[in-house]
Amino acid sequence: MTARNWRDLLALISGRRQENAVQDLPEGMRDESVDRMEFLLSLRRRGISDAAVLRAIDAVPREKFVLAEFADAAYADQAMPIACGQTISQPYVVAYMTEQLEVQREHRVLEIGTGSGYQAAILSQLAGEVITVERYRTLAETARKALAELGYDNVNVIVGDGLNGVPEHAPYDRIIVTAAAETIPEKLVEELAEGGIMVLPLGEHHGPQRIVKLTRGEDGVTQQELIWVRFVPLLPGQAREL
């Protein structure tokens, strides 16, 4: 979708035609990108309002980060399986966590849990540098290839133990964890710059979790509890296989 169409769609949200905006689009706009149009509209309706985040999501072709058999449903608001028994998060959760992270172009961002690379791709549109860690070599290599093919050259994919972070590049202005931790990972907090923000799902691995937003200030770290979610578990170490 072009930037112009994106702006037109956002304008359509306001007013009485909000619910029928996609159906009433001019004939020339009703092409293969209609799913993405509906996708962006649904994010707006659910409260995603940061224009930079919406532009980033519009710019990244989600179908390049899902398994081929799910490409036709890439813009459905649901999690999908990827290799190594992992998942790509539903688009709303990706958008929500990204918005809560408050990323600026001058920021260096650390992501724990590369997965397919989709979240890193979104972050690449917003940050100056993205370092992303994946414990499964297969996922890391696939994500690295997809990111390179799309020209996202400010992303560095590392195979390793995400719970250790990447201390040689610390501190980080922003940290995002895309797997559920049962306790706050202290090593990652140590790698967070003063004034930095970390967003992660926190809770039992076999139960519901909450997105938690940590902000590091002069007086320590403050914690804000946000929406309920369900993520795959954050596990220690680098995977021996896959």
Image: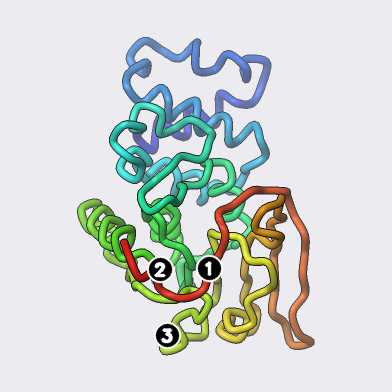
Whether pointer 1 and pointer 2 mark residues with C-beta atoms closer than 8 Å, the reply is yes
Closest to the observer: 95 or 166?
A: 166
The residue at which mark 2 appears reads as 135
Q: How far is the residue under mark 1 from the one under mark 2?
A: 9 Å
* Real-space Cα separation, disc 3 to disc 2, in angstroms: 18 Å
Q: Amino acid at mark 2?
A: Arg
Residue carrying label 3: 169
Residue 219 location in percent, x, y? 79, 87
Q: Quadrant of the N terminus?
A: top left
> For the residue carrying disc 1, how many other residues have a C-alpha within 10 Å: few (<14), some (14-19), or many (20+)?
some
Q: Amino acid at mark 3?
A: His
Give the structural element (helix, strand or loop) at label 1.
loop
Say whether residue 180 is left or right of residue 124: right
Which quadrant would the C terminus be assigned to in this image?
A: bottom left
**Residue 30 numbered tag:** none
Circle 2 Cα neighbour tier, 10 Å, few/some/many (<14 / 14–19 / ≥20): many
Q: Are marks 3 and 2 in contact (CB under 8 Å)?
A: no
Percent of width and height locating residue 118: 40, 51
Taking the image as drawn, is residue 130 in sight? no
At 34% from the left and 72% from the top, the residue drawn is 159
Residue type at mark 1: give it.
Leu
Q: Earlier in the sequence, mark 3 or mark 1?
A: 3
Q: In the rendered structure, which disc, 3 or 2, sits on the residue that comes first in sequence?
A: 2
Q: Residue 227: percent from the left, percent from the top?
A: 73, 49
